[in-house]
Image (tube, rainbow, N blue to C red):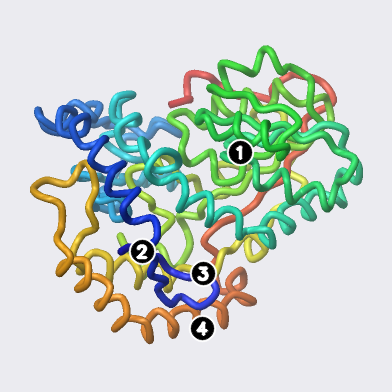
Amino acid sequence: MTTTPDRSTGAPRTTTGKAAARAAQVAVLRPRYRADLADGTDRFFEPRRSTCPWCRSTLLRVRLRTRDLLQHKPGRFVLTECHSCGHVFQNPRLTDAGLEFYYRDFYDGLGEQRLAGMFATRAGAYRGRARSVAPLAPAPERWLDVGTGHGHFCHTAREVFPDTSFDGLDSSEGVLLAEREGRLAHGHRGSFPELAPTLAGRYDVVSMFHYLEHSTDPTRELTAARAALRPGGLLVIEVPDPACGWARTLGRWWLPWLQPQHLNLMPVANLRRRLGELGFEVVLEQHGEAHDPVDLLAACWLLLDARAPREDAPWAPGAPPGRLRLLLRGALFLAGSPVLLAATAIDHLLAPVAGRLRLSNAYRLVARAAPTREMAGYRPDLAG
């Protein structure tokens, strides 16, 4: 039995039909995870850095210490904040082996069905993102969505831009599935900076919706976007806002911290400045429009999940949980339903004023590439 939150009400949903298939999948994956964890998790982390990857300042402080609150994979994670520029970054950062380990079975594999189902219900948010571009580019010919996953944004955005050809880029195999199922005209699988030379000058719009915070080097991603855009093209970015009031109030229970997946969280002033250095002009900044009203619901859900008996997972130590533990888990979430419903109500009550109250958990920038490909004063020596 598994429990997941219903995004419309916050109430838990219980499903049993696919439990046996999931149990079999977990059993197949368990030997590999146990081999990966046989020597601990130290190899998954780089040495701790003493300078900010955004501005190179040495004035740093610990912002947050936490664990993996979603998958419950082993490990401890630290977010460091720069006193000079406000940049928040994972420190020590995951190595390539760490990124592979912690991303495995999150967006694909064991976690694919859950997340794909959630993303498929986000049509309203996807339309809002597309409509933010319409006044600035009424009829773009070609659009590249970076970090597209299964292409759900592109599929929905066609309602706003029916004559636009939407391509997607992602490191997971979901992008190829999205192409086969018709949600993308073409799917590019791989690293954006590495693929950018083959995409040079091809697109009128490049979008990065909740992608940049996952990057080990955000500036390199922005440079790749500059290369892929035609002169005068638009770059659309949406990222979590580390200056959000909920970030401090909720602490490690604030979902957008999302450790260990989120590596860099940029205050809006930092990102605006870097875009200018790379030859972009910011033409639109939105906060309330980018807000996703789930902060209290997600925090309550994470708290309940942390207290509840664990579901079986291939990285979990010990024997798989018995039926009694799973029943106790379901009972705890059922008992917590009133709290989840109340949190949902408060989230939606505050949503219309989130931007004004500095409670917006994300912001959106639209930037236009300069007519030439010159970069206005960007210094590569300051990149992370």
Instruction: Say which residue label 1 marks.
Output: 148
Q: Quadrant of the C terminus?
A: top left
Q: Relative to 256, is 77 on the left or the right?
A: left
Label 2 – label 3 distance at C-alpha: 19 Å
Return the mark for residue 7: 3
Identify the element where label 2 is drawn: loop
Q: Earlier in the sequence, mark 2 or mark 1?
A: 2
- Residue type at mark 3 is Arg
Asked whether disc 4 touches disc 2, contact meaning CB atoms under 8 Å apart, the reply is no
Q: x, y percentage for residue 328? A: 19, 73
- Residue type at mark 2 is Thr
Asked whether disc 3 touches disc 1, contact meaning CB atoms under 8 Å apart, the reply is no
The residue mark sitting in front, 2 or 3, is 2
Q: x, y percentage for residue 288? A: 64, 66
Instruction: Say which residue label 2 marks.
Output: 16
Q: Earlier in the sequence, mark 3 or mark 1?
A: 3
Label 4 – label 2 distance at C-alpha: 28 Å
Label 4 – label 3 distance at C-alpha: 11 Å
Asked whether disc 2 touches disc 3, contact meaning CB atoms under 8 Å apart, the reply is no
- Residue type at mark 1 is Thr
Q: Residue at x 25, y 78 (%)?
A: 331
81 lies above or below 355: above
Within 10 Å of disc 3 (Cα), the crowding (few <14, some 14-19, many 20+) is some
Q: 329 or 283, which lies in front?
A: 329
79 lies above or below 329: above
Q: x, y percentage for residue 92? A: 26, 35
Label 4 – label 1 distance at C-alpha: 30 Å
Instruction: Say which residue label 4 marks.
Output: 345
